[in-house]
Image: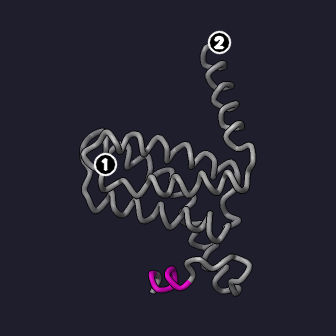
Amino acid sequence: EREREREMLAGTPLSRLNKDQELMIAKWSDILRPCFGQARLDLGTRLVRRKMKEQLATAFCEATSFMVSLITVYESRSFNHSWITTTVTILNATNEEAAKSEFSQELEPLIQSWNDLVRYCDRCYPNWFGGISEMIKRIERAMSS
């Protein structure tokens, strides 16, 4: 049932959704947003310890793709600018870790999710990359002092 709903809504702008569909997207967003960070940490730990299964890698990619579509297609209000740009950074690090692992092929769809978020940020937040660069410089200065 959920898969059918997801397929039905794919590509539908948020402004053209009815109230029930908007509520469903809001609920999915509220579930995925807080779980993503923990799921990513778990994935990273499993990659390092080589205790990963193909099904887990596939499920993580599918959940990430769905979450990214909530942001980029439906422009869910549950994800704010800071969370989205942080997620771009997290996905970049995850892609780097995945490329070094034996699960690089299974985790390859994360690259598309990352690309989709980067394009979204370029469109919606004109100077988002400069903001991330400045934040990293401030953190590095604080750590070196």
The part of the chain drawn in magenta is: 3-8
User: On the rendered image, what quadrant is the C terminus found in?
Assistant: top right
Q: Is residue 22 above or below residue 88?
A: below
- Secondary structure, mark 1, is loop
Q: In the rendered structure, which amino acid carries the disc numbered 1? A: Ser
Q: Which residue is mark 2?
A: 145
Q: Give the camera-side residue of 61 and 126.
A: 126
**x and y percentages locating residue 68 in the rendered image:** 55, 62
User: On the rendered image, what quadrant is the N terminus found in?
Assistant: bottom left
Q: Is residue 138 above or below residue 97?
A: above
> Who's the residue at 64% across and 51% down the image?
83
- Secondary structure, mark 2, is loop
Cα separation, mark 2 vs mark 1, equals: 37 Å
Q: Give the camera-side residue of 110 and 67.
A: 110
Q: Which residue is mark 1?
A: 104
Q: In the rendered structure, which amino acid carries the disc numbered 2? A: Ser
> Who's the residue at 31% across and 56% down the image?
106
